[in-house]
Image (spheres, rainbow, N blue to C red):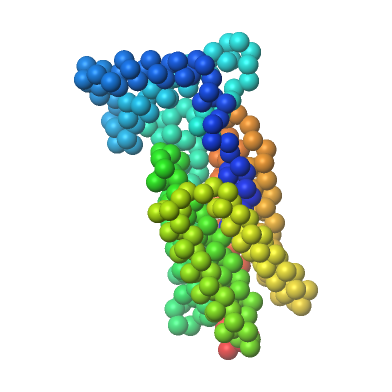
Amino acid sequence: MIIWYFLFYFSLNIIIFASPGDNHYLYRACLNHCKQINCSTSLGLRDFQDKQTFFEYIFQWSCQDECSYECMWKTVDNMQSNGQPVVQFHGKWPFKRFLGIQEPASTLFSILNLLSNYIFGYKVLRHHLKYGVYPLYSMWMMFCFIAMNAWIWSTIFHTRDKPLTEIFDYIGAISLIFSQFACCIIRVSYRTKYIRLAKFVTLFLLMFFIYHAYYLLFIHMDYGYNMTVNVIVGVLNVICWLLWSIINFISGKIYVWRCAVSVVLAMIFAALELVDFAPIAWIIDAHSLWHFFTMFLPILWYRFIIDDSRYLLRYIY
């Protein structure tokens, strides 16, 4: 279900840190002037605090953030009036905030993805499967919790893009890739002579993920390194699930079509990240559309998990 992340990070991590909008002469001049007038004196700061809305205060829009936001839109208006193409600022397209939310559409769709994993994942698994009865129940419940955690951090990140929320969004996303790949390894080797090897590989993946998260959080937020890890594990994940689905479908396990379709749709939806465009109405961009489509994938994915668990219970035990 979560394979689409690797394409997202491939496109995300090749961002040039100095976006064209950051170096625009009007933006730089406006930003310096705004900070000097509004953020450098007690009178200016008091005026800023008086004008700040409740939601902007809750979501920690500082005086400097407000200057950057206002100057960005002044620059965008100037570009449009002169017939110039709108460019990105600080690695992002300009978005109209709503109730202090920096990227309203992506935030909303992240919440819907969270609800989708809760309703079609957690609740459905709890309803149809039982602990101690169905094989791999604990593994799939753990995966569901990891998925929900990732979408929580996606929601937080799109609400307010801060260095810390960005890192936790990255960690949450890669945790999904690692966990789904680990689930594939365990499922492929389940009840075979390779199960011990599979557990060893899974333990290695867990240790590497912990190291990766520690490195990003405490040592260095290396976008290139993070991209490389995401792409490698993501591709292995895609290959593993697709091959397993094809082999089992040919052998007569018709229900695995849901797994294969989930993988294929995930890759198709991820392609939206490669078709980048300025936000429609300054709200909906390719990334938010990607989040919109992915919220339907849990319906297929968790249904596959239920069917597969029933198969294991019936034909293996």
Q: Nearer the viewer, residue 221 or 63?
A: 221
Q: Specify the farthest residue to the top.
A: 82
Q: Specify the farthest residue to the right.
A: 250
Q: Residue at x 57, y 15 (%)?
A: 79
Task: Decide if residue 20 is in sight here.
Answer: yes
Task: Decide if residue 148 is in sight here.
Answer: no
Query: Where does residue 269 sit, x and y in percent of width and height?
Result: 65, 48
Determine whether 279 is above or below 293 in the image.
above
Determine whether 219 is above or below 56 in the image.
below
Q: Nearer the viewer, residue 251 or 22?
A: 22
Quarter that holds the C terminus: bottom right
Q: Residue at x 43, y 34 (%)?
A: 102
The number of callouts visible is 0
* Residue 210 shown left or right of residue 19 in the figure: left
Query: Where does residue 121 sit, x and y in percent of width and height?
Result: 50, 62
Q: Specify the farthest residue to the front.
A: 219
Query: Where does residue 10 sit, x and y in percent of width and height?
Result: 62, 48
Q: Residue at x 67, y 67 (%)?
A: 241
Q: Residue at x 37, y 17 (%)?
A: 34
Quarter that holds the N terminus: bottom right
Determine whether 126 is above or below 110 in the image.
below
- Looking at the rendering, which quadrant does residue 188 occupy? bottom right
Query: Where does residue 165 sit, x and y in percent of width and height?
Result: 41, 46
Q: Nearer the viewer, residue 289 or 36?
A: 36
Determine whether 167 is above or below 119 in the image.
above
* Residue 78 shown left or right of residue 192 in the figure: left
